[in-house]
Amino acid sequence: MGYRNKTYIAFDGDNDMHYYRLMTAWKANDGFSLNFHNAHDLNTARDSSQEESIKRQLRERFANSKMLIILIGENTRYLTKFVKWELEVALKLGLPIVGVNLNASRVIDDRCPLTIKNELVIYVPFKHNIIEYALDTWPSEFARLRNEGKSGDFNYVQDVYTRLGL
């Protein structure tokens, strides 16, 4: 198994690709401090028409991932072929999950996939500063809460958003 330093990003590839691309642009731009090692940079499925081929490549990405970001859009909760599977794998591996609401909600809402409802997940809006904060702080907070036997949805208090200028 490789060194787990990657961030796995799951999303609706048909409808929310531009949000994923914006995150990678934030990472690439010197004016932003968002820094993550993208698990999607590891490989590309050779035969993208075969579900098992795709899942094999995704498993390889998971083997190098330390956390998962799920971009939650209008249709994410309905995606059962890959997104549901990706979330199930992340839960099985015990990866910290950050739910990023594309509708700017700071809390869990009805767009959330059922797979992660009632699971130990932090929810944030699609804003650079709070995503960066979650990347930096959620893994250790997740580990502490998990060790205490906690579960359910979490969100940051208003003071955190104020400090981040949001």
Image: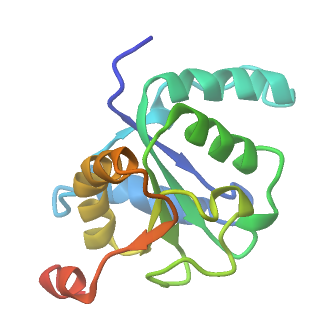
View extreme (top): residue: 1
Residue 24 versus residue 40 in the image, above or below: below
x and y, in percent, of residue 136 in the image: 22, 53
Q: Is residue 73 above or below residue 149?
A: below
- In the rendered view, does 58 fall on the left or right side of 40? right
> Quadrant where the N terminus lies?
top left
Q: Nearer the viewer, residue 97 or 82?
A: 97
Q: Position of residue 43 (x, y in %)?
A: 55, 24
Which is nearer the eye, 26 or 130? 130
Residue situated in front as seen by the camera: 96 or 24: 96
Coloration of the structure image: rainbow
Q: Position of residue 25 (x, y in %)?
A: 37, 56
Q: Is residue 107 above or below residue 116?
A: below
Q: Position of residue 130 (x, y in %)?
A: 29, 71
Quarter occupied by residue 54: top right
Task: Name the residue located 55 percent from the left edge and 77 percent from the top edge.
Answer: 108
The residue sitting at 40% across, 52% down in the picture is: 24
The count of marks equals 0
| 70 displayed left or right of 146 | right
